[in-house]
Amino acid sequence: MVMGCSCFGTSHVKKQETSVQRELEGHSLDKIRNFSYKELRLATDDFDKSTKIGRGGFGVVYKGILKDGTQVAVKALCAESKQGVREFLTEINTISNVRHPNLVELIGCCVEGSHRILVYEFLENNSLDHALLGKKTKSLELDWKRRSEICIGTARGLAYLHEELQPHIVHRDIKASNILLDKDFKPKIGDFGLAKLFPDSITHISTKIAGTTGYLAPEYVLGGQLTLKADVYSFGVLILETISGRSSSAASWGSMPKVLLEWAWELYGEGKLLELVDPDLKTYSEDEVIKYIKVAFFCTQATANRRPMMSQVVDMLSRNIRLNEKELTPPGFFQDSNDNKKVSDASTSRQISSFPTTITQVTPR
């Protein structure tokens, strides 16, 4: 059997196995289970393509059923770690200790030969992009209540990674396919912490930048500046996708090719923001939807230090406050047109200043 992640190779060299076993001796995992490769092969029907449920920047994901009947998501990592076995397990231990209601839980891992496999909790409703862009069914219907809760829950998970956790984690790849939905459509962020396991050459930005067009912050595209504010930018785009039911990637909005953010900003200037709303959304609060779109604009400001922290975003989305639109400047976005890559903002002039402290005003009850 040949697994989808061919980058690990399929040969089992005894010397390599012995070397890995030697490194594993005396190194225990704190809170997660150490699976054997045989266990995971059985759980996924030998990694059969019929069990494949997704593919991300770091590997292929299969649905697995353990011997006790537990359903799991098995991610076979598709890149050689930049670390040895002990260092890899140390990092996995760190990730396994990160627990939050809006983060996908890591159950276990497999480090055997060249295989690096992570085992996560299985989430019944797949990913947000599957719910938004996949085949529409009654069971996957996203009304406004669910969409707003997905935005707020994701914001809370990111705020935890950015501000409560020590050391902080920058996700690097916030997008709809990395937001998983449980049976009640509660959002959980996947793939957090994985970027630290691999060389920079393996990340989505350097391998296939066009694959995440529309999500990437201008400073990330131009200079590879990886900060918390790059995640905030991606989250802003995610809000627009959730409201519109459309992909952020470049597409034709009207007569010209534009990314979703660019189109949304044009609608804002024309006073037509509600044209952004997914036609599948039959009933919703117009005021709430408009507020969420404006929060997305704050998150996607062209200049990173004008974007809010995620804890501020949680407040902006969940509390009864009025946004101070006077502080809103045009967003920045990445354009990719036949290898002519450039970063633009939505106006001819870019204002450079620190993010204001008066972005919100409490609305009296």
Image: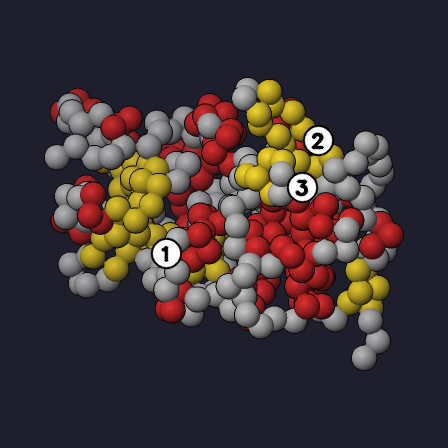
Residue 208 point in image, percent of width and height: 46, 28
For marks 3 and 1, give the CA distance.
26 Å
Q: Secondary structure at mark 2?
A: strand
Dot label at residue 344: 2
Q: Residues within 10 Å of mark 1 (few under 14, many from 20)?
A: few
Residue 105 or 139: which is nearer the viewer? 139
Q: Secondary structure at mark 3?
A: helix
Q: Residue at x 78, y 49 (%)?
A: 269
Q: Residues within 10 Å of mark 2 (few under 14, many from 20)?
A: some
Indicate which disc, 3 or 1, sits on the residue closer to the N terminus.
1
Q: Secondary structure at mark 1?
A: loop
Q: Residue at x 42, y 36 (%)?
A: 57
Task: Please state which of the two labelled residues, at mark 1 or mark 2, is closer to the viewer.
Answer: 1
Residue 53 point in image, percent of width and height: 30, 49
Does 239 sit above or below residue 330?
A: below
Dot label at residue 135: 1
Task: Please state which of the two labelled residues, at mark 2 or mark 3, is closer to the viewer.
Answer: 3
Residue 73 or 207: which is nearer the viewer? 207
Does 278 sit above or below residue 301?
A: below
Residue 163 point in image, percent of width and height: 64, 51
Total tally of numbered discs in the picture: 3
Residue 362 point in image, percent of width and height: 82, 68
Q: Callout 1, which amino acid?
A: Lys
Dot label at residue 262: 3
Q: Callout 2, which amino acid?
A: Ser
